Image (cartoon, rainbow, N blue to C red):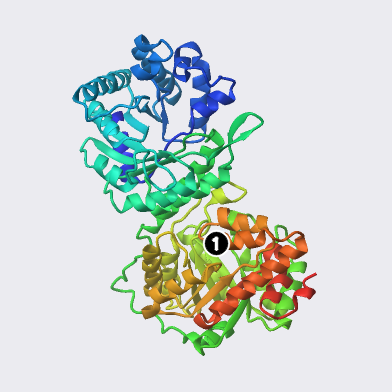
């Protein structure tokens, strides 16, 4: 496929990642706002080249030419109306030199820069001529596709589309809207983009600039219902603030990356940035989205949909659920269960963790659950940790098993190993992408997702391995899975939950619950296929902790009223006490609807978890 078809190829295969702001970066390099930034393509090409290079090093699929305002009308303000061809062709040459053959070059085109009534036939002809001139220059200079951006008038962008279509290049058309999801002329975003998407020359439509990622996420939900073409999102880094005479964008790269993941989860297929976004913002976005895309792709692979061979047979009878562990027995009897999450140490000293597990056992907690590389961090083997806790303390462990780090062979061997050393309780999860942790350049394996791994463990419980070989005795694992009541797409989450049950899931633990309403809605949706559901609880310790959970932890939703409430804590002790109170209020509201509670020990403080469960008083937290 030729270079001009690469955009379509990438859109077909998944997600396309674009660059960020050009003007912001030029301004940060000392270019005054009263300069014509597009003229820098001729006067200071190295400055433009440096900006492009930063985004390419961030790992984007395409960069945009420095030509947003390089149409005849905008350039005339600087006396440069005769330089349209020179400025646009120079911009493409600079971008192409840096991009090489591996990165696409998009020809950026903005609005005319003056208010024009497109209902006036003469004005429309003039506008068409202006857009056609720039589009032709960009096409002849060798861009891969055209991107029309920051338009606020639907009629104007449709004229630009008609002009761009004449080049034969793929076209991405983007509008900018306000917080109410309307253009400057009052047209709702979904209706505006539906009109644009109807043009056969447009391969993708979307939103750029606007008010920031949070508002754009809400608008994206609206647009997806109205448009059947790929959607692009390129938000500002929030709203700018004036700091010591400079307009600065306050959204951090991590904040942008979190929203980029949500854009992707919701269905956006072109993701980048606009005003205020830097190469660091884009680097974080690229790593986050690419990791998620790889995990998503793995989820769709039929890696363990293995049909029995004629010689395989049905395998061994599965041990009754209630007989596999004390945890399973309580679940089977319909009794309430309690578990505390304890994270393995970064080193090899298990002493302090053993003491915490012993305190859990002494206060009547049913089990401790051990995460598998939480937040993609490197810690002592969770299997070794679980084994030592069971042997030294006697309390049962729930071993998390994530799909991120092991291939098909390795994960199967680990499940067999866990069974051999007496670990029976599992919680199967897909796992956080490596980008979220301390090793952003590590690769995720994701040979399986949580559904396919559930199916694999179910087969091992029948004494059949992945290759169809039988063995005896079989494993006797208690198969738990995760559930996210606040998933962006509840329909998709419910569908995956049902697939997990079909694959063999026997109980579930939810993401931390901060919004009881979301949990109740999820439980109602899965009421016809219920397995025991244990609600996750995270006691907050401070406003900073609450903001981190809200912005940085995938699958967790923290309502604004909780953030506002945590903001009232003036000291560390007040923050812990307030967080415990909120957690206990959550438990009171949801306890009748679930079969148990899985309480995290924030920052390793097990006494906070025990206080929330009512095992000790809040004054005993220390």
Where residue 529 appears, as percent x and y from the top left, is 38, 79
In this picture, residue 600 sits left or right of residue 129: right
Where residue 260 appears, as percent x and y from the top left, is 47, 47
In this picture, residue 172 sits left or right of residue 27: left
Please count the marks in the image: 1
Neighbour tally class for label 1: few under 14, some 14-19, many 20 plus, Cα within 10 Å: few
Where residue 398 appears, as percent x and y from the top left, is 59, 73
Of residue 308 and residue 70, the one placed in the foreground of this image is 70
Q: Identify the residue at horizontal 35%, vertical 37% (top origin).
A: 174
Where residue 573 appears, as percent x and y from the top left, is 77, 64
Above or below for 455 versus 322: above
Q: Quadrant of residue 525?
A: bottom left
Can the viewer see residue 269 in this picture? yes
Above or below for 105 versus 532: above
Q: Identify the residue at horizontal 75%, vertical 78% (top origin).
A: 617
Of residue 399 and residue 485, the one placed in the foreground of this image is 485
Above or below for 189 versus 335: above
| Quadrant showing the N terminus | top left
Can the viewer see residue 380 in this picture? no
Which secondary structure lies at badge 1? loop
Above or below for 406 versus 135: below
Q: Quadrant of residue 247?
A: top right
| Quadrant showing the C terminus | bottom right
Q: Residue furthest bottom?
A: 333
In this picture, residue 95 sits left or right of residue 310: right
Residue that badge 1 annotates: 559
């Amino acid at each position: 496929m030729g270079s001009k078809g690469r955009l379509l190829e990438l859109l077909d295969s998944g997600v396309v990642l674009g660059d960020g702001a050009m003007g912001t970066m030029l301004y940060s390099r000392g270019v005054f706002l009263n300069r014509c930034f597009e003229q820098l393509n001729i006067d200071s090409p190295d400055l433009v080249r440096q900006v492009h290079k930063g985004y390419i090093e961030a790992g984007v699929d395409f960069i945009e030419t420095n030509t947003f305002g390089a149409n005849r009308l905008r350039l005339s303000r600087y006396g440069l109306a005769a330089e349209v061809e020179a400025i646009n062709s120079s911009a493409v040459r600079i971008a192409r030199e840096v991009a090489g053959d591996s990165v696409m070059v998009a020809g950026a085109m903005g609005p005319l820069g003056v208010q024009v009534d497109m209902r006036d036939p003469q004005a429309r002809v003039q506008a068409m001529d202006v857009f056609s001139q720039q589009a032709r220059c960009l096409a002849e200079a060798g861009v891969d596709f055209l991107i029309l951006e920051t338009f606020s008038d639907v009629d104007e962008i449709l004229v630009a589309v008609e002009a761009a279509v004449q080049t034969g290049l793929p076209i991405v058309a983007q509008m900018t809207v306000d917080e109410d999801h309307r253009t400057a002329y009052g047209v709702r975003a979904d209706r505006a983009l539906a009109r644009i998407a109807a043009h056969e020359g447009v391969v993708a439509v979307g939103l750029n600039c606007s008010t920031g990622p949070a508002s754009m996420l809400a608008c994206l939900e609206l647009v997806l219902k109205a448009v059947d073409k790929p959607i692009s999102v390129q938000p500002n880094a929030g709203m700018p603030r004036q700091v010591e005479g400079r307009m600065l964008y306050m959204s951090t790269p991590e904040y942008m990356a979190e929203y980029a993941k949500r854009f992707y989860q919701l269905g956006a297929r072109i993701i980048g940035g606009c005003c205020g976004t830097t190469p660091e913002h884009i680097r974080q976005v690229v790593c986050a989205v690419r990791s998620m895309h790889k995990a998503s792709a793995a989820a769709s692979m039929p890696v363990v949909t293995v049909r029995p061979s004629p010689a395989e047979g049905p395998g061994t009878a599965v041990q009754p659920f209630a007989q596999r562990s004390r945890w399973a027995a309580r679940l089977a009897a319909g009794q309430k269960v309690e578990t505390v999450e304890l994270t393995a140490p970064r080193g090899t000293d298990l002493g302090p963790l053993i003491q915490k597990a012993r305190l859990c056992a002494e206060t009547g907690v049913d089990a401790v659950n051990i995460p598998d590389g939480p937040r993609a961090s490197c810690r002592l083997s969770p299997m070794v940790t679980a084994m030592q806790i069971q042997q030294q303390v006697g309390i049962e462990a729930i071993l998390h098993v994530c799909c991120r780090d092991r291939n098909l062979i390795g994960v199967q061997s680990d499940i067999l190993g866990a069974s051999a050393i007496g670990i029976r309780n599992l919680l199967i999860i897909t796992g956080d992408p490596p980008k979220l942790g301390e090793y952003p350049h590590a690769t995720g394996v994701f040979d399986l997702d949580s559904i396919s791994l559930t199916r694999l463990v179910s087969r091992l419980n029948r004494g059949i391995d992945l290759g169809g070989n039988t063995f005896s005795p079989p494993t006797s694992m208690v198969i738990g899975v995760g559930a996210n009541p606040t998933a962006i797409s509840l329909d998709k989450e419910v569908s995956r939950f049902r697939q997990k049950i079909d694959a063999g899931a026997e109980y579930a633990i939810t993401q931390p619950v901060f919004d009881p309403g979301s949990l109740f809605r999820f439980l109602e949706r899965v009421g016809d296929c219920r397995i025991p559901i244990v609600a996750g609880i995270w006691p907050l310790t401070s406003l900073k902790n609450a903001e981190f959970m809200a912005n940085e932890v995938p699958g967790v939703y923290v309502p604004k009223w909780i953030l506002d409430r945590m903001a009232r804590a003036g000291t560390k002790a007040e923050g812990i006490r307030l967080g415990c109170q909120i957690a206990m209020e959550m438990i009171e509201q949801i306890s009748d609807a679930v079969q148990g509670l899985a309480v995290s020990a924030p920052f390793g403080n097990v006494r906070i978890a025990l206080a929330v469960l009512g095992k000790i008083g809040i004054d005993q937290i220390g």
